[in-house]
Image (cartoon, rainbow, N blue to C red):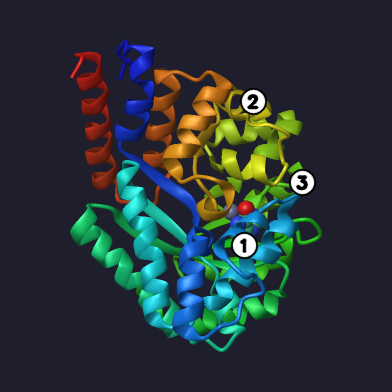
């Protein structure tokens, strides 16, 4: 649709109200320090931090690895089905408040199975929260199982095998954890198997890693979306490919700022990606660690980059179109999106 004129002062309200999808959220990254301490107490797990405040003070990251070390330590308090449920439910309630109508949620089973937590426990708890979100919050939530790329492809195969009894409870697979030194092609065979199984495929690429990793995620893993992908701007041929094939990028501005991918939010290249015709989306990545959920990612990025209502419409629409929901569901959400913009244009 033609974007109607909406007064700039209503932009913050519009950003929150517009229906949108969140496509890049690690559920373990939504674990707030308060819940980490509550679960540690509930489960009798000792933490190397004396208080919530001390833990929060440790959230001063210099790169991806400095974050991952603390993120995996935080996840160690998750033991029971109820813990996984409570974590996901807390996230989904926040997402609903931010206007999220669809959430495609990453989880890292290897972080839990390595500690002796059964795959069934992880998936059952997360799945129960997703079902409750659909019924009680109107949020359509699905799970995407991520392989940890610092581990071997053989371990990824074992993880897939363990998860297959719950094949109907996740819609796809992803690739996350330490990017540098672990290129997508390391997982070529396991992704080929996942494609045969009819699973959707996505991968983190070009967060810290070079454009070559984005190329191999596309051409070797044959992923449908690139998670992050901001380093693609260094390669004009790659930018042309991403635009031509309408490959969605799940960009995470506050994450990129916290992990020093960009020195400052004002230096972020989201506007450049949109101007080049890429199908960029905005997401929160690990909101408990990076200073904000989806609403904060939108409001802070729009303020820092001076984005407007046209960008807001484009980003919300991209997120809905880039989701793995049915064409009918997407059509219905886009109609709601258009209705919200028309209401704001009419002063309502
Ligand atoms: N990058 C890679 N792995 C991750 C991230 C991330 O931003 N968050 C959680 N696991
Ligand atoms: Zn991520």
Residue 18 appearing in the image: no
User: Crowding near pointer 3: few (<14 within 10 Å), some, many (20+)?
Assistant: some
Q: Position of residue 250 (x, y in %)?
A: 53, 44
Q: Which tag is nearer the camera, tag 1 or tag 2? A: 1
- Counting labels gives 3
Mark 3 vs 1, N-terminal side:
1
Secondary structure, mark 2, is helix
Secondary structure, mark 1, is helix
Q: Residue at x 62, y 62 (%)?
A: 55
Mark 2 vs 3, N-terminal side:
3
Quarter occupied by residue 135:
bottom left
Q: Position of residue 216 (x, y in %)?
A: 70, 52
Instruction: Compare residues 274 and 48 and report the one nearer the observer.
Output: 48
Compared across the picture, whether 121 is left or right of 270 comes to left
Q: Position of residue 256 (x, y in %)?
A: 65, 42
Checking the image for residue 266, the label placed there is 2
Instruction: Compare residues 9 and 174 and report the one nearer the observer.
Output: 9
Checking the image for residue 212, the label placed there is 3
Q: Disc 1 to disc 2, how far (Cα)?
A: 28 Å
Report which residue position mark 1 lands on: 55
User: Crowding near pointer 2: few (<14 within 10 Å), some, many (20+)?
Assistant: some
Mark 1 vs 2, N-terminal side:
1
Q: Disc 2 to disc 3, how far (Cα)?
A: 26 Å
Compared across the picture, whether 229 is left or right of 138 comes to right
Q: Residue at x 37, y 70 (%)?
A: 86
Q: Which tag is nearer the camera, tag 3 or tag 1? A: 1
Asked if the residues shown at circle 1 and circle 2 are in contact, with their CB atoms under 8 angstroms apart, the answer is: no
């Amino acid at each position: 649709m033609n974007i109607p004129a909406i007064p700039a002062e209503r932009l913050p309200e519009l950003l929150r109200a517009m229906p949108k999808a969140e496509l890049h959220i690690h559920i373990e990254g939504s674990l707030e320090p308060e819940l980490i301490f509550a679960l540690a107490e509930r489960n009798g797990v000792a933490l190397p931090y004396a208080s919530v405040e001390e833990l929060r003070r440790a959230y001063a990251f210099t790169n991806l690895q400095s974050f991952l070390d603390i993120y995996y330590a935080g996840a160690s308090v998750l033991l029971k089905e109820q813990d996984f449920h409570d974590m996901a439910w807390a996230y989904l309630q926040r997402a609903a408040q931010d206007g999220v109508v669809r959430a495609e949620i990453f989880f890292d089973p290897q972080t839990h199975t390595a500690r002796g937590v059964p795959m069934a426990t992880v998936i059952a708890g997360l799945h129960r929260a997703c079902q409750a979100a659909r019924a009680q919050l109107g949020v359509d939530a699905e799970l995407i199982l991520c392989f940890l790329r610092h581990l071997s492809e053989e371990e990824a195969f074992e993880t897939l095998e363990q998860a297959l009894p719950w094949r109907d409870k996740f819609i796809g697979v992803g690739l996350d954890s330490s990017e540098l030194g672990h290129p997508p092609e390391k997982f070529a065979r396991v992704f080929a198997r996942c494609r045969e199984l009819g699973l959707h495929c996505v991968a983190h690429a070009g967060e810290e890693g070079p454009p070559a990793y984005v190329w191999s995620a596309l051409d070797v893993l044959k992923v449908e979306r690139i998670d992050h992908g901001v380093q693609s701007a260094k390669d004009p041929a790659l930018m042309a490919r991403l635009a031509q094939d309408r490959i969605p990028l799940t960009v995470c501005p506050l994450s990129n700022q916290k992990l020093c991918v960009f020195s400052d939010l004002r230096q972020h290249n989201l506007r450049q990606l949109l101007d080049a015709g890429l199908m960029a989306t905005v997401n929160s990545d690990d909101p408990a660690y990076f200073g904000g959920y989806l609403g904060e990612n939108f409001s802070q990025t729009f303020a820092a980059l001076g984005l407007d209502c046209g960008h807001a419409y484009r980003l919300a629409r991209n997120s809905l179109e880039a989701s793995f929901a049915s064409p009918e569901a997407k059509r219905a959400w886009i109609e709601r999106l258009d209705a919200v913009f028309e209401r704001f244009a009419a002063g309502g």
